[in-house]
Amino acid sequence: MSLFSAVEMAPRDPILGLNEQFNADTNPAKVNLGVGVYYDDKGKLPLLQCVQIAEKAMMEAPKPRGYLPMDGVAAYDAAVKTLVFGADSEPVKSGRVATAQGIGGTGGLKIGADFLKKLSPNAKVLISDPSWENHRALFAQAGFTVESYPYYDAAKRGVNFDGMLAALNTAAEGTIVVLHACCHNPTGYDITSTQWDQVIAAVKARKLTAFLDMAYQGFGHGIVEDGAVIGKFVAAGLNFFVSTSFSKSFSLYGERVGALSVLCESKEEAERVLSQMKVVIRTNYSNPQIHGATVVANVLNNPELRALWEKELAEMRVRIKAMRQKLVDGLKAAGVKEDMSFITTQIGMFSYSGLSKDQMVRLRNEFGVYGTDTGRMCVAALNSQNINHVCASIAKVL
Ligand code: PMP
């Protein structure tokens, strides 16, 4: 009898399971739209020029690798604050933002979740229905009861905003609300600027704690445009959490570069909050890694590299948008009668296609086109070689 005899096999991660199935598929025309990764038009994972230049400079002036402080690379944390809140913004100038480097955006969320559990042990967490699969698991693992607020409206092909607002307006005081700052994953539907104002009013009136997950800044309308929601929360005088991920925007997935920023009332309060974030970090993994965060800091803090990054990020954004249009046009050309133009009103890396589970299974088994059972497809993995096959295949299952 082993210590582990009764250990059950954990359910397979749906996306990773899909990847395994994709890798084993011998169909030469197979296309993987299940992943949340941006590929270029040649189907390759980009290594950004700005990253290569920064890494070359780092290799030419090698540095020893001592432990970082618990909150990470100081120049990186400063760059994150500037990016998220704006260099000349009042919160940055007054020093009331507490920022710590995290292990990817997931790490930022986890630091926030553990800190919040100590701060508000009895609060409930609300996430969107549907949401990034890990939101529920991550907050549940931190000890919270996780429920959802309505978000996707399949019939409308958009957001059930009335439902969302009603849920926020009836949430108990202190409820933690996880909001996708831009490029909602998985649906691709964001709320409008006016709707954000209503969400903020509800957060304020009900004394909710907003946790903005910013995993795709720059993939929607632009770096500034996508970040504008942060300015709205600041202007409303709220204290809130923002997790940042550079996995997509720097194509640095495997370097695990992210952060958590908490907007506090004062500099002195931010110091106390940061000290508690450091306790969470210390007891989880002591301190983060040097390489990825240094690359990002060196790019963001150097005007030329920063301009290059903005150009490269814009190229990714524009290419995704072009693929959305090609998908709509291609589906029409392939004989789809249904109006598929909703695909171009969605934003970011994903499209909720509206296809049923059965249709997604057929796409996979008969045509080698892989998306999730929920109908989510990664439009950032479409390219000029695979688009026709994808359009023809969808047309056949619709
Ligand atoms: N939040 C959302 C909404 C995401 O889509 C992702 C990544 N797919 C993350 C957080 C996590 O980011 P990271 O990979 O940097 O941990």
Image (cartoon, rainbow, N blue to C red):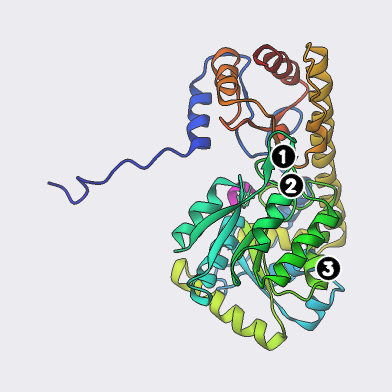
Q: Nearer the viewer, mark 2 or mark 1?
A: 2
- Per the image, label 3 sits on a secondary structure element best described as loop
Residue type at numbered disc 1: Met
Could you tell whether 351 is left or right of 9 in the image?
Answer: right
Could you tell whether 331 is left or right of 109 in the image?
Answer: right
Residue type at numbered disc 3: Gly
CB at mark 2 closer than 8 A to ligand 1? no
Query: Is there a contact, CB below 8 Å, between mark 3 and mark 1?
Result: no
User: Does the magenta run of residues contain 270?
Assistant: no
The answer to which of marks 2 and 1 sits earlier in the sequence is 2
Which residue does the numbered mark 2 point to in the structure image? 183
Prevailing secondary structure of the magenta residues = helix
Q: CA distance from mark 3 to mark 1?
A: 25 Å
Residue 86's disc is 3
Query: Is there a contact, CB below 8 Å, between mark 2 and mark 1?
Result: yes
Callout 2: 10 Å neighbours few (<14), some, many (20+)? Answer: many
Q: Which residues are magenta?
A: 251-255
